[in-house]
Amino acid sequence: AKTRRFLTIKSASVSPMAEDNEGTVKQQLSKLFETSLRMTIPDEPDLEPLVVKCTGKFGDYQCNNAMSCWAKVKGKKTEFKGPPSIGQAIAKNLPESEMIESCSIAGPGFVNVVLPNQWIAKSIQKMLERGIGIWAPKLPVSRAVVDFSSPNIAKEMHVGHLRSTIIGDTIARMLEYSNVEVLRRNHVGDWGTQFGMLIEYMFEKFPDWENAGEQAIGDLQAFYKASKLKFDADPVFKEKAQQAVVLLQGGNEKYRKAWSTICEISRKEFHQVYERLGISLEEKGESFYNPYIPKVLEGLSNQGLIVESEGARVIVIEGKQIPLIVVKSDGGYNYASTDLTALWYRLNEEKAEWIVYVTDVGQKLHFEMFFTAAKLAGWLPADEKLYPKTSHVDFGLVLGDDKKRFRTRSSEVVRLVDLLDEAKTRCKAELVERGKALEWTAEELEQIAEAIGYGAVKYADLKNNRSTNYTFSFDQMLNDKGNTAVYLQYAHARICSIIRKSGKDIEELKNTGTIVLGLPEERSLGLHLLQFAEVVEEACLSLLPNVLCEYLYNLSEHFTRFYAECKVNGTPEETSRLLLCEATAVVMRQCFHLLGIVPVYKI
Ligand code: ARG
Protein backbone atom coordinates (compact mmCIF):
# COMPACT_ATOMS: atom_id res chain seq x y z
CA ALA A 1 0.00 0.00 0.00
CA LYS A 2 1.25 3.43 -0.83
CA THR A 3 1.56 5.77 2.11
CA ARG A 4 2.25 9.43 1.87
CA ARG A 5 5.38 10.69 3.49
CA PHE A 6 5.29 11.78 7.06
CA LEU A 7 5.76 15.51 6.66
CA THR A 8 7.60 17.51 9.26
CA ILE A 9 8.07 20.70 7.25
CA LYS A 10 6.31 23.49 9.06
CA SER A 11 3.83 25.73 7.33
CA ALA A 12 4.64 29.38 6.69
CA SER A 13 2.34 30.43 9.48
CA VAL A 14 4.82 29.46 12.19
CA SER A 15 5.43 32.43 14.46
CA PRO A 16 9.01 33.72 14.66
CA MET A 17 8.84 32.72 18.32
CA ALA A 18 9.14 29.12 17.25
CA GLU A 19 12.86 29.61 16.64
CA ASP A 20 13.37 30.07 20.37
CA ASN A 21 11.32 27.01 21.06
CA GLU A 22 13.54 24.38 22.63
CA GLY A 23 10.78 21.87 23.16
CA THR A 24 9.11 20.82 26.38
CA VAL A 25 11.10 19.99 29.51
CA LYS A 26 10.34 16.35 28.83
CA GLN A 27 11.61 16.59 25.26
CA GLN A 28 14.79 18.36 26.36
CA LEU A 29 15.49 15.79 29.05
CA SER A 30 14.69 12.98 26.63
CA LYS A 31 17.39 14.23 24.30
CA LEU A 32 19.95 14.13 27.10
CA PHE A 33 18.89 10.64 28.10
CA GLU A 34 18.99 9.48 24.51
CA THR A 35 22.66 10.43 24.33
CA SER A 36 23.32 8.70 27.63
CA LEU A 37 21.50 5.50 26.58
CA ARG A 38 23.60 5.24 23.41
CA MET A 39 26.76 5.42 25.50
CA THR A 40 25.48 3.07 28.16
CA ILE A 41 24.14 0.33 25.86
CA PRO A 42 25.98 0.85 22.56
CA ASP A 43 24.68 -2.43 21.12
CA GLU A 44 21.10 -1.13 21.15
CA PRO A 45 21.22 2.20 19.33
CA ASP A 46 17.43 2.51 18.96
CA LEU A 47 16.44 2.65 22.61
CA GLU A 48 13.74 5.23 23.21
CA PRO A 49 14.17 7.25 26.38
CA LEU A 50 11.23 6.82 28.77
CA VAL A 51 11.05 10.09 30.68
CA VAL A 52 8.09 10.92 32.91
CA LYS A 53 7.12 13.76 35.18
CA CYS A 54 7.05 12.70 38.83
CA THR A 55 5.54 14.03 41.98
CA GLY A 56 7.69 12.11 44.43
CA LYS A 57 10.21 13.67 46.76
CA PHE A 58 13.14 12.25 44.77
CA GLY A 59 12.98 14.47 41.77
CA ASP A 60 11.00 16.38 39.19
CA TYR A 61 11.40 13.90 36.32
CA GLN A 62 12.34 10.29 36.09
CA CYS A 63 13.95 8.11 33.43
CA ASN A 64 12.59 4.56 33.49
CA ASN A 65 14.83 2.75 31.03
CA ALA A 66 16.96 0.64 33.35
CA MET A 67 14.56 -2.30 33.59
CA SER A 68 14.01 -2.69 29.86
CA CYS A 69 17.74 -2.23 29.21
CA TRP A 70 18.45 -5.02 31.66
CA ALA A 71 16.04 -7.28 29.79
CA LYS A 72 18.11 -6.66 26.64
CA VAL A 73 21.59 -7.24 28.08
CA LYS A 74 20.79 -9.98 30.58
CA GLY A 75 22.49 -13.24 29.73
CA LYS A 76 24.90 -11.52 27.36
CA LYS A 77 28.44 -10.58 28.29
CA THR A 78 27.88 -7.43 30.30
CA GLU A 79 29.49 -5.32 32.98
CA PHE A 80 26.06 -4.72 34.59
CA LYS A 81 24.78 -6.69 37.56
CA GLY A 82 21.14 -5.62 37.33
CA PRO A 83 18.85 -2.66 36.66
CA PRO A 84 20.23 -0.47 39.49
CA SER A 85 23.75 -0.62 38.08
CA ILE A 86 22.38 0.28 34.63
CA GLY A 87 20.54 3.21 36.22
CA GLN A 88 23.80 4.36 37.74
CA ALA A 89 25.56 4.20 34.39
CA ILE A 90 22.71 6.07 32.66
CA ALA A 91 23.03 8.83 35.26
CA LYS A 92 26.82 8.93 34.93
CA ASN A 93 26.71 9.14 31.14
CA LEU A 94 24.28 12.06 31.04
CA PRO A 95 25.84 14.97 29.18
CA GLU A 96 26.68 18.08 31.15
CA SER A 97 23.62 20.36 31.14
CA GLU A 98 22.43 23.46 32.90
CA MET A 99 18.98 21.92 33.23
CA ILE A 100 20.16 19.23 35.65
CA GLU A 101 20.78 20.08 39.27
CA SER A 102 21.27 16.56 40.51
CA CYS A 103 20.54 12.93 39.71
CA SER A 104 19.81 10.03 42.01
CA ILE A 105 18.92 6.37 41.61
CA ALA A 106 15.85 4.98 43.30
CA GLY A 107 14.27 1.54 43.48
CA PRO A 108 15.05 -0.74 40.55
CA GLY A 109 17.17 1.75 38.65
CA PHE A 110 14.90 4.77 38.21
CA VAL A 111 17.01 7.81 37.45
CA ASN A 112 15.56 10.86 39.17
CA VAL A 113 16.41 14.32 38.00
CA VAL A 114 16.05 17.55 39.94
CA LEU A 115 15.86 20.72 37.87
CA PRO A 116 17.80 23.72 39.17
CA ASN A 117 15.68 26.56 40.58
CA GLN A 118 17.63 29.04 38.55
CA TRP A 119 16.99 27.23 35.31
CA ILE A 120 13.25 27.05 36.01
CA ALA A 121 13.24 30.75 36.84
CA LYS A 122 15.19 31.64 33.71
CA SER A 123 12.85 29.66 31.46
CA ILE A 124 9.83 31.47 32.91
CA GLN A 125 11.48 34.81 32.43
CA LYS A 126 12.28 34.02 28.85
CA MET A 127 8.60 33.22 28.27
CA LEU A 128 7.58 36.53 29.85
CA GLU A 129 9.98 38.42 27.60
CA ARG A 130 9.20 36.68 24.33
CA GLY A 131 5.63 35.58 24.76
CA ILE A 132 3.81 32.33 25.48
CA GLY A 133 4.37 31.26 21.85
CA ILE A 134 7.80 29.95 22.78
CA TRP A 135 6.14 27.29 24.92
CA ALA A 136 4.14 25.85 22.04
CA PRO A 137 4.79 22.11 21.75
CA LYS A 138 6.12 20.68 18.52
CA LEU A 139 3.75 18.16 17.00
CA PRO A 140 4.52 15.59 14.30
CA VAL A 141 2.03 17.10 11.80
CA SER A 142 1.81 20.41 10.01
CA ARG A 143 -1.74 20.36 8.62
CA ALA A 144 -4.88 18.91 10.14
CA VAL A 145 -8.62 18.88 9.50
CA VAL A 146 -10.88 19.17 12.52
CA ASP A 147 -14.41 18.18 11.50
CA PHE A 148 -16.72 19.42 14.24
CA SER A 149 -20.09 20.93 15.14
CA SER A 150 -21.66 19.66 11.88
CA PRO A 151 -25.38 20.12 12.63
CA ASN A 152 -28.09 19.09 10.21
CA ILE A 153 -30.06 21.54 8.14
CA ALA A 154 -33.60 22.20 9.31
CA LYS A 155 -33.09 20.27 12.49
CA GLU A 156 -32.45 21.99 15.78
CA MET A 157 -28.94 22.71 16.97
CA HIS A 158 -29.29 21.19 20.38
CA VAL A 159 -27.15 20.53 23.40
CA GLY A 160 -25.63 17.43 21.75
CA HIS A 161 -24.15 19.69 19.10
CA LEU A 162 -22.84 21.87 21.90
CA ARG A 163 -20.39 19.17 22.82
CA SER A 164 -19.13 18.72 19.28
CA THR A 165 -18.84 22.47 18.81
CA ILE A 166 -16.88 23.27 21.93
CA ILE A 167 -14.74 20.12 22.08
CA GLY A 168 -13.86 20.56 18.41
CA ASP A 169 -13.08 24.23 18.80
CA THR A 170 -10.74 23.53 21.72
CA ILE A 171 -8.92 20.83 19.82
CA ALA A 172 -8.52 23.17 16.87
CA ARG A 173 -7.22 25.92 19.16
CA MET A 174 -4.69 23.64 20.83
CA LEU A 175 -3.38 22.44 17.46
CA GLU A 176 -3.23 25.99 16.13
CA TYR A 177 -1.23 27.11 19.14
CA SER A 178 1.13 24.21 18.39
CA ASN A 179 1.74 25.71 14.94
CA VAL A 180 -0.38 23.18 13.08
CA GLU A 181 -2.37 24.64 10.22
CA VAL A 182 -5.95 23.67 11.01
CA LEU A 183 -8.78 23.42 8.48
CA ARG A 184 -11.86 23.85 10.65
CA ARG A 185 -14.63 22.02 8.85
CA ASN A 186 -18.36 22.13 9.39
CA HIS A 187 -19.60 18.93 7.76
CA VAL A 188 -23.19 20.16 7.74
CA GLY A 189 -25.90 17.62 6.95
CA ASP A 190 -27.26 19.55 3.96
CA TRP A 191 -28.03 16.68 1.59
CA GLY A 192 -30.45 13.84 1.86
CA THR A 193 -33.97 12.67 1.34
CA GLN A 194 -35.51 15.02 3.92
CA PHE A 195 -35.07 17.86 1.44
CA GLY A 196 -37.71 16.48 -0.90
CA MET A 197 -40.30 16.82 1.83
CA LEU A 198 -39.09 20.26 2.92
CA ILE A 199 -39.08 21.65 -0.60
CA GLU A 200 -42.51 20.29 -1.54
CA TYR A 201 -43.93 21.66 1.69
CA MET A 202 -42.43 25.06 1.01
CA PHE A 203 -43.94 25.13 -2.49
CA GLU A 204 -47.36 24.35 -1.06
CA LYS A 205 -47.31 26.69 1.89
CA PHE A 206 -45.52 29.61 0.32
CA PRO A 207 -46.13 29.86 -3.41
CA ASP A 208 -44.27 33.15 -3.21
CA TRP A 209 -41.20 31.52 -1.57
CA GLU A 210 -38.78 33.06 -4.07
CA ASN A 211 -39.52 36.52 -2.74
CA ALA A 212 -40.61 35.81 0.77
CA GLY A 213 -39.02 32.41 1.52
CA GLU A 214 -36.84 33.33 4.45
CA GLN A 215 -39.32 35.58 6.20
CA ALA A 216 -42.23 33.28 5.50
CA ILE A 217 -40.63 30.09 6.80
CA GLY A 218 -39.35 31.75 9.96
CA ASP A 219 -38.88 28.96 12.47
CA LEU A 220 -37.30 26.20 10.46
CA GLN A 221 -37.74 23.56 13.13
CA ALA A 222 -41.48 24.08 13.28
CA PHE A 223 -41.45 23.97 9.51
CA TYR A 224 -39.57 20.68 9.56
CA LYS A 225 -42.00 19.16 12.04
CA ALA A 226 -45.05 20.26 10.06
CA SER A 227 -43.70 18.90 6.81
CA LYS A 228 -42.79 15.61 8.46
CA LEU A 229 -46.35 15.28 9.80
CA LYS A 230 -47.73 15.80 6.35
CA PHE A 231 -45.20 13.39 4.85
CA ASP A 232 -46.29 10.64 7.24
CA ALA A 233 -50.02 11.30 6.89
CA ASP A 234 -50.54 12.09 3.21
CA PRO A 235 -49.50 9.50 0.60
CA VAL A 236 -49.93 11.91 -2.30
CA PHE A 237 -47.60 14.38 -0.63
CA LYS A 238 -45.15 11.60 0.15
CA GLU A 239 -45.04 10.61 -3.49
CA LYS A 240 -44.41 14.20 -4.53
CA ALA A 241 -41.66 14.56 -1.94
CA GLN A 242 -39.92 11.48 -3.27
CA GLN A 243 -40.05 12.85 -6.79
CA ALA A 244 -38.67 16.13 -5.49
CA VAL A 245 -35.55 14.32 -4.24
CA VAL A 246 -34.99 12.90 -7.71
CA LEU A 247 -35.43 16.32 -9.31
CA LEU A 248 -33.13 17.98 -6.78
CA GLN A 249 -30.40 15.39 -7.16
CA GLY A 250 -30.75 15.55 -10.92
CA GLY A 251 -29.88 19.24 -10.73
CA ASN A 252 -33.31 20.77 -11.56
CA GLU A 253 -32.84 24.50 -11.25
CA LYS A 254 -36.01 25.35 -9.39
CA TYR A 255 -35.46 22.60 -6.84
CA ARG A 256 -31.83 23.59 -6.43
CA LYS A 257 -32.86 27.11 -5.68
CA ALA A 258 -35.46 26.01 -3.15
CA TRP A 259 -32.84 23.81 -1.49
CA SER A 260 -30.39 26.66 -1.15
CA THR A 261 -33.08 28.95 0.28
CA ILE A 262 -33.73 26.44 3.04
CA CYS A 263 -30.01 25.92 3.70
CA GLU A 264 -29.48 29.65 3.95
CA ILE A 265 -32.06 30.01 6.72
CA SER A 266 -30.41 27.26 8.74
CA ARG A 267 -26.98 28.71 8.13
CA LYS A 268 -28.02 32.03 9.63
CA GLU A 269 -29.26 30.33 12.77
CA PHE A 270 -26.10 28.30 13.20
CA HIS A 271 -24.02 31.35 12.61
CA GLN A 272 -25.63 33.22 15.48
CA VAL A 273 -24.60 30.50 17.88
CA TYR A 274 -21.04 30.40 16.55
CA GLU A 275 -20.74 34.12 16.91
CA ARG A 276 -21.85 34.06 20.51
CA LEU A 277 -19.44 31.27 21.31
CA GLY A 278 -16.54 32.93 19.46
CA ILE A 279 -16.14 30.01 17.12
CA SER A 280 -14.97 30.18 13.53
CA LEU A 281 -15.32 27.32 11.11
CA GLU A 282 -15.72 26.83 7.42
CA GLU A 283 -18.76 25.07 6.02
CA LYS A 284 -18.10 22.28 3.59
CA GLY A 285 -21.31 20.36 3.97
CA GLU A 286 -22.21 16.93 2.64
CA SER A 287 -23.39 18.42 -0.66
CA PHE A 288 -19.90 19.76 -1.32
CA TYR A 289 -18.50 16.25 -1.74
CA ASN A 290 -21.41 14.93 -3.77
CA PRO A 291 -19.89 15.58 -7.22
CA TYR A 292 -16.74 13.65 -6.27
CA ILE A 293 -18.49 10.49 -5.06
CA PRO A 294 -18.75 8.59 -8.38
CA LYS A 295 -15.05 8.96 -9.14
CA VAL A 296 -13.92 7.95 -5.69
CA LEU A 297 -16.19 4.90 -5.68
CA GLU A 298 -14.99 3.97 -9.14
CA GLY A 299 -11.42 3.98 -7.86
CA LEU A 300 -12.38 1.71 -4.98
CA SER A 301 -14.27 -0.54 -7.38
CA ASN A 302 -11.25 -0.83 -9.63
CA GLN A 303 -9.23 -1.94 -6.62
CA GLY A 304 -11.79 -4.71 -6.19
CA LEU A 305 -12.93 -3.41 -2.82
CA ILE A 306 -16.59 -2.86 -3.66
CA VAL A 307 -18.87 -5.84 -4.10
CA GLU A 308 -22.55 -6.43 -4.74
CA SER A 309 -24.67 -7.49 -1.77
CA GLU A 310 -28.47 -7.78 -1.74
CA GLY A 311 -28.77 -5.17 -4.45
CA ALA A 312 -26.50 -2.70 -2.67
CA ARG A 313 -22.82 -2.03 -3.26
CA VAL A 314 -20.70 -2.58 -0.19
CA ILE A 315 -17.19 -2.83 1.23
CA VAL A 316 -16.67 -5.88 3.38
CA ILE A 317 -14.91 -5.11 6.66
CA GLU A 318 -13.32 -8.08 8.33
CA GLY A 319 -14.55 -8.72 11.86
CA LYS A 320 -17.74 -6.68 11.42
CA GLN A 321 -21.12 -8.34 11.10
CA ILE A 322 -22.38 -5.91 8.50
CA PRO A 323 -20.55 -4.48 5.51
CA LEU A 324 -20.12 -0.77 4.83
CA ILE A 325 -22.85 0.22 2.34
CA VAL A 326 -21.60 2.77 -0.16
CA VAL A 327 -24.40 2.65 -2.74
CA LYS A 328 -27.91 1.86 -1.49
CA SER A 329 -30.08 -0.65 -3.35
CA ASP A 330 -32.04 2.25 -4.90
CA GLY A 331 -28.78 3.55 -6.37
CA GLY A 332 -28.50 6.51 -3.98
CA TYR A 333 -25.48 7.49 -1.95
CA ASN A 334 -25.44 7.70 1.84
CA TYR A 335 -23.58 9.06 4.87
CA ALA A 336 -20.73 6.59 4.34
CA SER A 337 -20.22 7.34 0.65
CA THR A 338 -20.01 11.03 1.51
CA ASP A 339 -17.60 10.46 4.39
CA LEU A 340 -15.30 8.25 2.35
CA THR A 341 -15.26 10.86 -0.39
CA ALA A 342 -14.67 13.70 2.09
CA LEU A 343 -11.72 11.76 3.49
CA TRP A 344 -10.32 11.25 0.02
CA TYR A 345 -10.67 14.98 -0.63
CA ARG A 346 -9.03 15.95 2.65
CA LEU A 347 -6.07 13.69 2.02
CA ASN A 348 -5.53 14.41 -1.66
CA GLU A 349 -6.84 17.90 -2.32
CA GLU A 350 -6.26 19.46 1.07
CA LYS A 351 -3.15 17.46 1.96
CA ALA A 352 -4.17 17.00 5.57
CA GLU A 353 -2.02 14.66 7.64
CA TRP A 354 -4.36 14.27 10.58
CA ILE A 355 -8.14 14.24 10.19
CA VAL A 356 -10.07 14.52 13.43
CA TYR A 357 -13.84 13.94 13.66
CA VAL A 358 -15.82 15.11 16.68
CA THR A 359 -19.19 13.38 17.15
CA ASP A 360 -21.10 11.51 19.82
CA VAL A 361 -20.06 7.98 20.68
CA GLY A 362 -23.16 6.63 18.90
CA GLN A 363 -21.33 7.03 15.59
CA LYS A 364 -18.32 5.00 16.65
CA LEU A 365 -19.05 2.06 14.38
CA HIS A 366 -19.53 4.29 11.34
CA PHE A 367 -16.08 5.82 11.82
CA GLU A 368 -14.38 2.50 12.54
CA MET A 369 -15.85 1.07 9.36
CA PHE A 370 -14.87 3.77 6.94
CA PHE A 371 -11.45 4.28 8.53
CA THR A 372 -10.82 0.58 7.93
CA ALA A 373 -12.05 0.90 4.35
CA ALA A 374 -9.56 3.75 3.82
CA LYS A 375 -6.75 1.56 5.13
CA LEU A 376 -7.80 -1.28 2.84
CA ALA A 377 -7.65 1.17 -0.06
CA GLY A 378 -4.13 2.17 0.97
CA TRP A 379 -5.12 5.78 1.66
CA LEU A 380 -3.92 5.47 5.24
CA PRO A 381 -1.08 3.38 6.68
CA ALA A 382 -2.27 0.41 8.74
CA ASP A 383 0.09 1.39 11.56
CA GLU A 384 -1.74 4.02 13.63
CA LYS A 385 1.50 5.55 14.82
CA LEU A 386 2.10 6.79 11.29
CA TYR A 387 0.56 9.72 9.47
CA PRO A 388 -1.62 10.50 7.62
CA LYS A 389 -4.11 9.28 10.14
CA THR A 390 -7.72 9.69 11.21
CA SER A 391 -9.10 9.95 14.74
CA HIS A 392 -12.65 9.80 16.01
CA VAL A 393 -13.08 12.08 19.01
CA ASP A 394 -16.18 10.59 20.61
CA PHE A 395 -18.17 11.98 23.50
CA GLY A 396 -20.98 10.92 25.81
CA LEU A 397 -24.44 12.32 26.50
CA VAL A 398 -25.50 15.45 28.32
CA LEU A 399 -27.85 14.42 31.12
CA GLY A 400 -30.48 16.30 33.09
CA ASP A 401 -31.06 16.23 36.85
CA ASP A 402 -33.02 13.01 36.45
CA LYS A 403 -29.89 11.39 34.91
CA LYS A 404 -31.77 10.96 31.67
CA ARG A 405 -31.05 12.72 28.40
CA PHE A 406 -31.21 16.47 29.03
CA ARG A 407 -34.68 17.83 28.08
CA THR A 408 -36.80 20.85 28.86
CA ARG A 409 -39.70 20.53 31.31
CA SER A 410 -42.05 19.86 28.44
CA SER A 411 -39.72 17.09 27.21
CA GLU A 412 -38.51 19.10 24.27
CA VAL A 413 -34.93 18.98 23.07
CA VAL A 414 -33.04 21.83 24.75
CA ARG A 415 -32.02 24.50 22.28
CA LEU A 416 -28.50 25.79 22.46
CA VAL A 417 -29.43 29.47 22.29
CA ASP A 418 -31.73 29.14 25.28
CA LEU A 419 -28.94 27.65 27.36
CA LEU A 420 -26.60 30.49 26.47
CA ASP A 421 -29.26 33.05 27.28
CA GLU A 422 -29.89 31.53 30.66
CA ALA A 423 -26.18 31.30 31.54
CA LYS A 424 -25.75 34.97 30.74
CA THR A 425 -28.88 36.09 32.57
CA ARG A 426 -27.91 34.23 35.71
CA CYS A 427 -24.39 35.69 35.68
CA LYS A 428 -25.67 39.17 35.16
CA ALA A 429 -28.09 38.88 38.06
CA GLU A 430 -25.27 37.68 40.29
CA LEU A 431 -23.01 40.56 39.27
CA VAL A 432 -25.79 43.09 39.86
CA GLU A 433 -26.38 41.61 43.29
CA ARG A 434 -22.71 42.10 44.06
CA GLY A 435 -23.10 45.78 43.25
CA LYS A 436 -21.21 45.69 39.96
CA ALA A 437 -23.90 47.62 38.08
CA LEU A 438 -22.83 50.68 40.08
CA GLU A 439 -19.12 50.12 39.48
CA TRP A 440 -19.13 49.26 35.79
CA THR A 441 -20.64 50.65 32.62
CA ALA A 442 -23.66 48.85 31.20
CA GLU A 443 -21.49 47.57 28.37
CA GLU A 444 -18.90 46.13 30.75
CA LEU A 445 -21.64 44.39 32.67
CA GLU A 446 -22.93 42.77 29.46
CA GLN A 447 -19.50 41.69 28.29
CA ILE A 448 -18.37 40.29 31.61
CA ALA A 449 -21.66 38.43 32.11
CA GLU A 450 -21.20 36.84 28.68
CA ALA A 451 -17.55 35.97 29.27
CA ILE A 452 -18.33 34.31 32.58
CA GLY A 453 -21.61 32.69 31.54
CA TYR A 454 -20.52 31.22 28.20
CA GLY A 455 -17.14 30.29 29.67
CA ALA A 456 -18.90 28.40 32.47
CA VAL A 457 -20.97 26.38 29.99
CA LYS A 458 -17.88 25.48 27.99
CA TYR A 459 -15.70 24.62 30.96
CA ALA A 460 -18.38 22.45 32.61
CA ASP A 461 -18.31 20.34 29.49
CA LEU A 462 -14.58 20.34 28.77
CA LYS A 463 -13.43 19.46 32.27
CA ASN A 464 -14.95 15.97 32.05
CA ASN A 465 -13.29 13.18 30.22
CA ARG A 466 -15.27 13.56 27.00
CA SER A 467 -16.14 9.87 26.72
CA THR A 468 -18.30 9.98 29.84
CA ASN A 469 -21.83 11.34 30.11
CA TYR A 470 -22.17 14.44 32.26
CA THR A 471 -24.99 16.15 34.08
CA PHE A 472 -25.86 19.65 33.03
CA SER A 473 -26.39 21.91 36.03
CA PHE A 474 -26.36 25.70 36.05
CA ASP A 475 -26.07 25.75 39.84
CA GLN A 476 -22.93 23.70 39.69
CA MET A 477 -21.21 25.38 36.76
CA LEU A 478 -21.93 28.89 38.04
CA ASN A 479 -20.64 28.21 41.53
CA ASP A 480 -17.68 30.43 42.37
CA LYS A 481 -16.07 27.66 44.42
CA GLY A 482 -14.60 24.39 43.23
CA ASN A 483 -13.45 23.40 39.79
CA THR A 484 -15.54 25.80 37.72
CA ALA A 485 -14.75 28.49 35.17
CA VAL A 486 -16.31 31.06 37.48
CA TYR A 487 -13.84 30.18 40.23
CA LEU A 488 -10.97 30.30 37.75
CA GLN A 489 -12.09 33.66 36.36
CA TYR A 490 -12.10 35.03 39.92
CA ALA A 491 -8.66 33.55 40.57
CA HIS A 492 -7.29 35.18 37.43
CA ALA A 493 -8.93 38.54 38.13
CA ARG A 494 -7.50 38.47 41.64
CA ILE A 495 -3.96 37.99 40.29
CA CYS A 496 -4.50 40.90 37.91
CA SER A 497 -5.61 43.02 40.83
CA ILE A 498 -2.53 42.09 42.91
CA ILE A 499 -0.37 43.33 40.03
CA ARG A 500 -2.45 46.49 39.55
CA LYS A 501 -2.42 47.33 43.23
CA SER A 502 1.36 47.07 43.44
CA GLY A 503 1.50 50.21 41.31
CA LYS A 504 4.48 48.74 39.43
CA ASP A 505 4.85 48.75 35.66
CA ILE A 506 4.87 45.02 34.98
CA GLU A 507 6.11 45.43 31.40
CA GLU A 508 9.17 47.17 32.72
CA LEU A 509 9.74 44.59 35.43
CA LYS A 510 9.78 41.89 32.75
CA ASN A 511 12.91 43.50 31.32
CA THR A 512 14.66 44.57 34.49
CA GLY A 513 13.56 42.16 37.21
CA THR A 514 14.73 38.65 38.08
CA ILE A 515 12.71 35.70 39.30
CA VAL A 516 14.17 33.91 42.32
CA LEU A 517 12.49 30.71 43.50
CA GLY A 518 13.30 30.78 47.22
CA LEU A 519 10.47 29.07 49.10
CA PRO A 520 9.07 25.62 48.21
CA GLU A 521 5.74 27.20 47.21
CA GLU A 522 7.51 29.47 44.75
CA ARG A 523 9.40 26.58 43.29
CA SER A 524 6.41 24.32 42.82
CA LEU A 525 4.43 27.12 41.21
CA GLY A 526 7.39 27.80 38.89
CA LEU A 527 7.76 24.15 37.93
CA HIS A 528 4.05 23.82 37.26
CA LEU A 529 4.15 26.88 34.99
CA LEU A 530 7.02 25.37 33.05
CA GLN A 531 5.07 22.17 32.49
CA PHE A 532 2.38 23.98 30.50
CA ALA A 533 3.95 23.01 27.16
CA GLU A 534 3.97 19.29 27.82
CA VAL A 535 0.40 19.38 29.07
CA VAL A 536 -0.74 20.99 25.81
CA GLU A 537 1.25 18.39 23.91
CA GLU A 538 -0.41 15.58 25.83
CA ALA A 539 -3.87 17.11 25.40
CA CYS A 540 -3.29 17.43 21.64
CA LEU A 541 -1.93 13.96 21.09
CA SER A 542 -4.58 12.27 23.22
CA LEU A 543 -7.29 14.67 21.97
CA LEU A 544 -8.42 15.16 25.58
CA PRO A 545 -9.20 18.77 26.54
CA ASN A 546 -9.87 17.73 30.17
CA VAL A 547 -6.12 17.27 30.56
CA LEU A 548 -5.71 21.01 30.03
CA CYS A 549 -8.60 21.84 32.41
CA GLU A 550 -7.01 19.75 35.12
CA TYR A 551 -3.73 21.57 34.62
CA LEU A 552 -5.46 24.94 34.83
CA TYR A 553 -7.25 24.06 38.04
CA ASN A 554 -4.03 22.75 39.58
CA LEU A 555 -2.29 25.94 38.54
CA SER A 556 -4.80 27.98 40.48
CA GLU A 557 -4.20 25.74 43.50
CA HIS A 558 -0.44 26.14 43.23
CA PHE A 559 -0.98 29.87 43.09
CA THR A 560 -3.22 29.85 46.16
CA ARG A 561 -0.54 28.02 48.16
CA PHE A 562 2.10 30.41 46.91
CA TYR A 563 0.06 33.46 47.78
CA ALA A 564 -0.75 32.14 51.24
CA GLU A 565 2.95 31.70 52.07
CA CYS A 566 4.59 34.49 50.11
CA LYS A 567 3.76 38.09 50.84
CA VAL A 568 4.13 40.10 47.66
CA ASN A 569 3.70 43.84 48.07
CA GLY A 570 6.31 45.74 50.05
CA THR A 571 8.72 42.82 50.58
CA PRO A 572 12.32 42.51 49.29
CA GLU A 573 11.05 39.69 47.02
CA GLU A 574 8.34 41.90 45.56
CA THR A 575 9.73 42.10 42.01
CA SER A 576 10.32 38.37 41.70
CA ARG A 577 6.93 37.55 43.14
CA LEU A 578 5.11 40.04 40.93
CA LEU A 579 6.77 38.39 37.95
CA LEU A 580 5.54 35.01 39.18
CA CYS A 581 2.05 36.48 39.49
CA GLU A 582 2.29 37.80 35.95
CA ALA A 583 3.55 34.48 34.58
CA THR A 584 0.66 32.70 36.28
CA ALA A 585 -1.81 35.16 34.78
CA VAL A 586 -0.27 34.76 31.31
CA VAL A 587 -0.46 30.97 31.44
CA MET A 588 -4.00 31.06 32.85
CA ARG A 589 -5.07 33.36 30.02
CA GLN A 590 -3.48 31.05 27.48
CA CYS A 591 -5.40 28.13 28.98
CA PHE A 592 -8.61 30.18 28.80
CA HIS A 593 -7.84 31.04 25.22
CA LEU A 594 -7.29 27.39 24.30
CA LEU A 595 -10.55 26.46 26.01
CA GLY A 596 -12.38 29.21 24.11
CA ILE A 597 -13.04 31.20 27.29
CA VAL A 598 -12.76 34.99 27.31
CA PRO A 599 -10.69 36.02 30.36
CA VAL A 600 -11.95 38.69 32.71
CA TYR A 601 -9.40 41.07 34.24
CA LYS A 602 -11.56 42.40 37.01
CA ILE A 603 -14.62 41.07 38.79
N1 ARG B 1 -24.27 15.78 10.70
C1 ARG B 1 -23.84 14.68 11.51
C2 ARG B 1 -24.78 14.53 12.71
O1 ARG B 1 -25.36 15.49 13.17
C3 ARG B 1 -22.42 14.81 12.02
C4 ARG B 1 -21.36 14.84 10.97
C5 ARG B 1 -20.00 14.53 11.51
N2 ARG B 1 -18.96 14.55 10.52
C6 ARG B 1 -18.74 13.62 9.62
N3 ARG B 1 -17.76 13.79 8.73
N4 ARG B 1 -19.44 12.49 9.57
O2 ARG B 1 -24.91 13.43 13.20
Image (cartoon, rainbow, N blue to C red):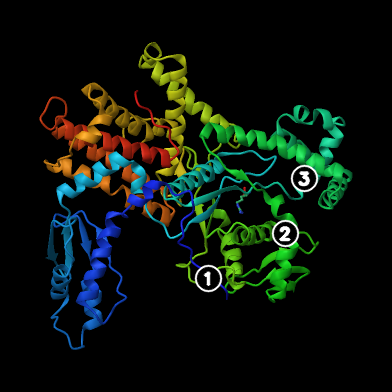
Tell me the SS state at disc 3. helix
Residue 195: mark in rendering: 3
Tag 3–tag 2 contact (CB < 8 Å): no
Instruction: Report the residue marked by disc 2.
Output: 292
Q: Of the residues under marks 2 and 1, which one precedes in the sequence?
A: 2
- Is 283 left or right of 102, judged from the image as shown? right
Q: Position of residue 240 (x, y in %)?
A: 88, 46
Amino acid at the residue labelled 1: Pro
Residue 381: mark in rendering: 1
Work out whether residue 409 can be spotted: no
Foreground mark, 1 or 3, reads: 1
Tell me the SS state at disc 1. loop
Ligand 1 within 8 A of label 2's CB?
no
Q: Position of residue 591 (x, y in %)?
A: 37, 41
Amino acid at the residue labelled 2: Tyr
Q: Of the residues under marks 1 and 3, which one precedes in the sequence?
A: 3
Residue at (66, 44) in percent of width and height: 152
Quarter assignment of residue 343: bottom right
Residue at (51, 53) in percent of width and height: 394
Quarter assignment of residue 550: top left
Tag 2–tag 1 contact (CB < 8 Å): no
Residue at (85, 36) in percent of width and height: 203
